Amino acid sequence: MQRYTQMKIDVKIKLTRGAQAPEYATDGSAAVDIRAALEGGEVIINPGERAMIPTGIAISTGRDDVVAIMAGRSGLGAKHGITLANGIGVIDSDYRGEIRATLINKGAEPFKVCDGDRIAQLMFMPVMQAAFLPVEELDETERGTGGFGSTGVN
């Protein structure tokens, strides 16, 4: 595999609840696993229920052109139906509070989250803010206004 220079960013991290700083699992990892910080406890999430799980971390990139994105872990979703209740979590550049993950159990069995369990992933991405320009018409495209399956399945 060809190696490219990775973009790096310094992130200040405040740890509470006995949390440890996250680490990348491999050189090719795009995100770090985020762990539950339950101070030795556990949380049961029954089917159809949600639970806000503390992570014990707060962060600052010191930049307003970067956003931290929290995503679900594929194994938890595929094996247990555990995912983030809001799909993804956006940690804005000016948020300084503890990062929490609101998990939802879409599975058929209760799911136990223990202190230190890997519950989500965190990645950093550039931000572009839009300047909205009102117009009467948009430029024409081949697709036009076709949506919701208009391009087919195959």
Image (cartoon, rainbow, N blue to C red):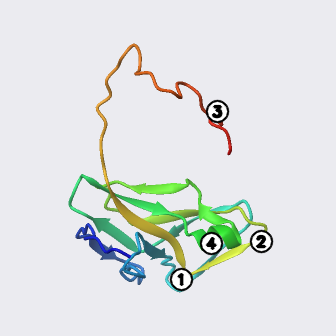
Residue indicated by mark 4: 76
Q: Earlier in the sequence, mark 2 or mark 4?
A: 4
From mark 3 to mark 1, how far is it between C-alphas?
46 Å
From mark 1 to mark 4, how far is it between C-alphas?
16 Å
Dot 4: element: helix
Q: Earlier in the sequence, mark 1 or mark 4?
A: 4
Front label number (1 vs 2):
2
From mark 1 to mark 2, how far is it between C-alphas?
20 Å
How crowded pointer 2 is (Cα within 10 Å; few <14, some 14-19, many 20+) is rated as few
Residue indicated by mark 1: 115
Residue indicated by mark 2: 109
Q: Amino acid at mark 1?
A: Asp
Residue indicated by mark 3: 150
Q: Quadrant of residue 123?
A: bottom left
Q: Earlier in the sequence, mark 3 or mark 1?
A: 1
Q: Total number of numbered labels?
A: 4
Residue at horizontal 39 percent and vertical 13 percent from the top:
136
